[in-house]
Amino acid sequence: MGIVSPVGPDAESSWQALLAGRSGVAATAGIDVTDLPVRIAAQVPDLDVAAMLGVRQTRALDRFAQLAVIAAREAVISAGWELTGGPRWSTVIGTGFGGVETFEQAMITLSQRGPRRISPYTAPAMIPNAAVAAVALDAGARGQSLCPTTACAAGTDAVGLGADLSGWVEPTSYWLVAPWLP
């Protein structure tokens, strides 16, 4: 299992926090909420993502995809899987939206500097399937990559699709990840 959550950067610390009854809800950080009625959120705390993924991959991915890769790597390690030259892996990651931070930055750039200043990497970083693509590429997965984008049902849909895949391509293992990351 791999987890990156508001209560911990990995599965063990997240589990211990939940057992201790610790909440991940706190005052919102990094977002201007002055005009909003709600000023709390369950945000994933800052992590040294560049140390975990490398500078190049960190710059290429939106935060939701970065966290998906980190969680997937932890899941592989905790399962004791070897990813080198092995089975045909399929990857299923459900999400509610995709690269919100990348989209927001593109809209700011568009309004302040014009369309020619928008990065050519905007679309690949903000699309909902950016996380499933990043995880599959990171792991060398060669099976199907699917990304249900069904709001709050995305996690359940990802689990269902992963189960259904056993009849489609017969991979020996599945990635089942359901990030819901703004």
Image (cartoon, helix red, strand yellow):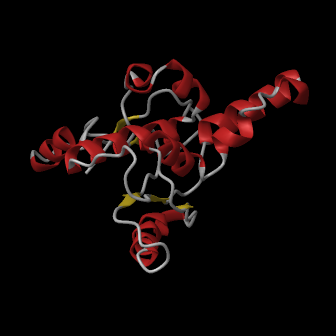
Give the left or right position of residue 56, taking residue 54 as reference. Answer: right
Residue 132 horizontal/vertical position (percent):
52, 51
Q: Residue at x 51, y 19 (%)?
A: 55
In the figure, residue 62 lies in which quadrant?
Answer: top right
- Up the image or down, 168 lies above or below 21; here it is below
Residue occupying the far front of the picture: 85
Relative depth, front residue between 10 and 168: 168
- Up the image or down, 32 lies above or below 94; here it is above
Relative depth, front residue between 43 and 137: 137
Q: Residue at x 43, y 34 (%)?
A: 28
Residue 156 horizontal/vertical position (percent):
41, 70
Residue 169 horizontal/vertical position (percent):
48, 72
Residue 89 horizontal/vertical position (percent):
43, 58
Relative depth, front residue between 104 and 78: 78
Tell me how many marks there are: 0
Relative depth, front residue between 84 and 75: 84
Residue occupying the far left of the picture: 20
Give the left or right position of residue 32, taking residue 159 as reference. Answer: right
In the figure, residue 158 lies in which quadrant?
Answer: bottom left
